Amino acid sequence: MQVRRVVPNVRSEALEESADFYGLLGFEEVMNHGWIRTLASAVNPAAQISFMGEDRTAPVTPDLSIEVDDVDAAHAALRERGAEIVHPLTDEEWGVRRFFVRDPNGRVVNVLGHR
């Protein structure tokens, strides 16, 4: 399994203002679902940051997202190790398959793959 990108998820009630602020640092919007906005570097598209007020399809807002090339293998490996799965493996309408897991520091990680 390989990691494709890591994206910090910043909880925010100021999505528009956050996008404007980080736009001044060279980020451009690459996704906007209304409740989550993801910005990426124009020259390095894997350099991303997301802002969200809440996760509308999960019970908790994740602290970061990690995109992997095989989300099912990641899910299986973490379950075998006894990790706490916070949100089950789910196919989302916007084209990702994902689950949430709690890391040893108590942070919630959104592990995802594009379908």
Image (cartoon, rainbow, N blue to C red):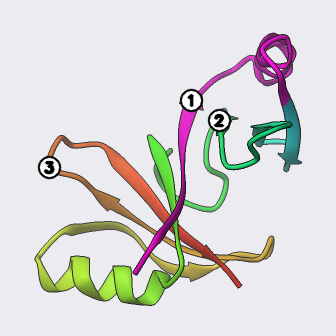
Residue for point 88% across, 32% down? 28
Mark 3 or mark 1, which is nearer the start of the sequence?
Answer: 1
Q: Quadrant of the C terminus?
A: bottom right
Q: Locate residue 24, reporting x and y percent.
A: 84, 11
The image quadrant that residue 26 belongs to is top right
Q: In the picture shown, does residue 64 fall above or below 114?
A: above
Q: CA distance from mark 1 to mark 3?
A: 19 Å
Q: CA distance from mark 1 to mark 2?
A: 8 Å
Left or right: 92 in relation to 109 = right
Q: Mark 3 or mark 2, which is nearer to you?
A: 2
Q: Amino acid at mark 2?
A: Ile
Determine contact: label 1, label 2, CB under 8 Å: yes
Q: Which mark is residue 104?
A: 3
Is 19 contained in the magenta span? yes
| Mark 1 Cα shell of 10 Å, populated few (<14), some (14-19), many (≥20) | many
Which span is picked out in magenta?
1-27
Q: Amino acid at mark 1?
A: Val
Left or right: 89 in relation to 32 = left
The image quadrant that residue 23 belongs to is top right
Q: In the picture shown, does residue 18 fall above or below 47?
A: above
Residue for point 65% across, 40% down? 47
Left or right: 65 in relation to 105 = right
Left or right: 105 in relation to 36 = left
Between residue 35 and residue 30, name the one nearer to us: 30
Q: Amino acid at mark 3?
A: Pro
Is 18 contained in the magenta span? yes
Where disc 1 sits, the SS reads strand
Residue for point 29% across, 88% down? 76
Task: Check disc 2 and report the residue beneath it.
Answer: 49
Q: Tally the marks.
A: 3
